[in-house]
Image: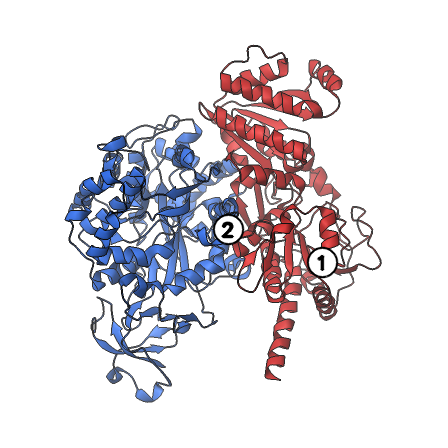
Chain colours: A blue, B red
Amino acid sequence: MLELRNAKILDPLHPMNGRTTSLFIDGSRISGTSLSQIDPPTVNRTIDLAGALVLAGGIDIHTHIGGGKVNLARMLMAATPEDKRTVWPTTQTGELYNQMGYTSCFEPAMLLPSARHTHLELADTPHIDSGAYVVLGNEDWLLESLRDGIEDEVLQSLVAWSVCASKALAVKVVNPGGINAFRFNQRTLNVDEPHVHFGVTPRDVIRRLTAAVEEIGLAHPLHVHASNLGVPGNVASTIATLDAAEGRRLHLTHAQFNCYSDDGPFEMGSGAELLSEYVNSHPNITVDVGQVVFGQTVTISADAAAQFRNRKFANPRQWIVNDIECQAGCGVVPIKYRDKQYVHSLQWTIGLELMLLIKDPWRVFLTTDHPNGGPFTSYPHLVRLLMDRTYRESMLERLHPEVQQRTLLREISREYTLDELAIITRCAPAKLLGLDDRGTLADGAVADLAAYHIKDNWESTFETAAWVFKGGEALIRSGKSTGATARCETIHATPDYDASAMSRFSSTIEQILRSPIDTLKISDREMDTLIRRPLVAGGINGD
Amino acid sequence: MLAVDNCCLCGLLCSSSTAVGIHEISECPRRKQWPANLPTATPNSPTKSVTRLLETINGASPLIWIDAADVNTTRAIVRLAKQTGTVCHIGQSTGTEVVKRVRSSGGWLGTSLSEIASHADLVLTLGDTILTEAPRIVDRFLRSDEEHLTEPRTWLHISAHGTSEEAHSSSRNASAPVCSERSMVVSREQWYEFLTKLLLALRSGSSRGIDDSRVVELYDRIVGSQYCAILWEADQFVDSVDELLIRRLASIAQVRSQDARCSLLCFQSNPGKVTAEETLLWLTGCTSTAKWNGQTWLTPDAYSSFSLDDWSSEFESIIIVRSVASLAPLPNINASLTVDCIPSGSVALLNDASPNVGEIQVLPSGVAETAHLFRGDQAVVAMSGPAIENTSGSGREEQGLTAEKLFAAALNRLQAKSLENNRA
């Protein structure tokens, strides 16, 4: 057993939160915080953390780190100087996350036909546990079924089967119906607008899928990339999207990109106040922000329609937009966010406004939608912006003058506390994903934890962890990699489904894909012998 | 027991577990070229094979040339290359390089095979290579008599051969060579002019003044379509002039996409190369050539423009690896060692092995597979093997080595030796 002495606990779920004590790690689990709870002779190793802040390992609930479109981005940006890249090889991705004290990360856009590719890349990303969300909501067969009035139970089986076949943890919908409509040359699809071919609206898709996800017992609500991403004035359709859940749980992802009013210069302003009020008054809604960070990055999205719109902003001027297998799309468009550019400045302020105006830290999550808003390596910088009002206001001086004038940030005095930081980056993501044994330092939790020495400012503090443990194995010691490897797992959900209901779709799917439906199923054996990543089940309510 | 048996001799990865299309997989002309019964190879001694491999790696300026490989073989190669500082290179076809350059330097609108099958109302296939390299593509994806089409479809095939006189004469009497609704012939030398006229017509919104009836016809069909898909095989367009053609196609897709949908698909007929490239890219961040410099993976600038001859002269110890079954001959680059999944001399397709070239025979992956990774724009499903599961129960796996095991064993030996040296 390992004793971590003089650990200053930062975990609102822990009885010793805020106090300096010992933590004990027994194998891969945390095992109590006081000598009275354990048998002292079993402690055979001690590390003195010298009062460092100790948190559970960070959990990134939405980060594009593995799969076909991520690899496309690597290809497209291969000529970018290394210090300006925001998409890295898999090994480097794991190392960079680990350095910051993150130990679990989740790929939010896994397509059914390329699920293997996603899992292979996640398997080759060391030091972090992972999982992925399967993208549904634009398949020809799904939209056809919704049009034809598919029964709830049958839809539930289709959704559950898709989760099981792809070894996913959750379900995501991207621009519901809109990516599919783009194939029929329908360039926009508003929430109550019918698909030109299938006649189904995005509202229909959201309503049916939120219900299905809830019924099959997935812990994570339907993860929604809303319609009209990036379009001025889209906050109205975003709120309509949230209404479409009819009170059921829904997670709105990278909310900043769907939070624009239509007033202001270039007919674009901040919708953060409106959206925050909605979220604050609707406890069924959770949100991750998708904060923009100034500098070069590349946007990667399954929303081919939106990326086609965005191609004219490509910087450098290269981009790829694909239709994929009658199920989804992908678009890769590099972008350079500039602090002096009105829209980019506005986006930067909106993300922070959302983080600061949404009151419940259990329902708002810090992300950059990596790499779309910026690289995940900027999280420490964003933490400083949230926790240090003076610093935040000093950053406003960099922005476009119109944005400086109009932003609410000057009026917001809120500074995130350490407890709130722990919640938005650890406790709350774990809870929302149904990972009861993570995101906390409580007895019995997985021994994923990070220790930070407090430095001059919060950015420096959280930039590099002094110690990182993954499953009880020290991966970072005194801020440097130990060279050790830890067992990392893919977490997936296994909802039940009715195989006979699913058989109704088999021949349709095979006709559309021109391949046996079995090619979409990843077996446990395949995960073990070919993809080579241990699986662990989770993400189901009541598990 | 295998869940699915996917043939990997072209990028369609047809499954033999279900007859897809009119013909059984066994009727495919490419499949028929693959030896039905591989000769029982004299098993390589794994120990000697590893020794031979390490001798080559430790030779002067080593290079691992990956001709075609599955994911796990590529993973093993990259691990060994990192340990030894050996350069890895995926032997790409020139056609693939041309498309990569175009795709990385402008905009690219892509699509995938089942999109073409279900959504495209106009399919243009360019050149005959697509039909010979993927013989079942017509049955599986291009026939317009399938009930699940969302729109009625026209397939127009444009052959590229011969002189301009032959092409013109041929067009007058055009008949559908392989069940396309319509076909035309454009000679090699006319392609650039042909596509330029088409692009100008699309940009101006009119074909008035165009004196080539083929261009006018094509223009009319494109503007009458809602989803036009343009499909060709990578090695149809291979040289620097062809790069201009690809750029024209990219521009045509972009111009047309302002009003309706138009997308491109460059079909890769070698899934083993696609697999190796994808794997190398996510592991190293390098697109086809990677070297570990002690801190990071990089592509040395000089190698970016290397020709086949340049590789031969730059490196003295070259190992060619092919762990995925392929009908293409191995490249002639003065290899010191080949790691191949077909015994030399057993199939006439292979180059004659030099007596000085070592060869390690490995079990092929891809003939029978349980898994594939997929990237839609490549129109290829590629392997996550090897997965030689004994469907026949023959115990064949025990009779030979896999490429992955070979490279993994080499790495283990190096690491064990290094540990020993450290202790000493």
The disc at residue A93 is: none
Q: Nearer the viewer, residue A286 or A503?
A: A286
Q: SS for tag 2? A: helix
Q: Quadrant of the C terminus of chain B?
A: bottom right
Q: Is residue A469 above or below residue A272?
A: below
> Which chain does the numbered disc 1 sit on?
B
Q: Is residue A270 above or below residue A484?
A: above
- On the same chain, marks 1 and 2? The answer is no
Counting from the top left corner in percent of width and height, residue B120 is at 51, 27
Mark 2: which amino acid?
Answer: His
Would you say A414 lies left or right of B296 here?
left
Mark 1: which amino acid?
Answer: Ile
Q: Is residue A498 visible?
A: no
Q: Which of the 4 image quadrants contains residue B44?
A: bottom right
Q: SS for tag 1? A: strand
Q: Which residue is mark 1?
A: B319
Q: Which residue is mark 2?
A: A117
> Which chain does the numbered disc 2 sit on?
A
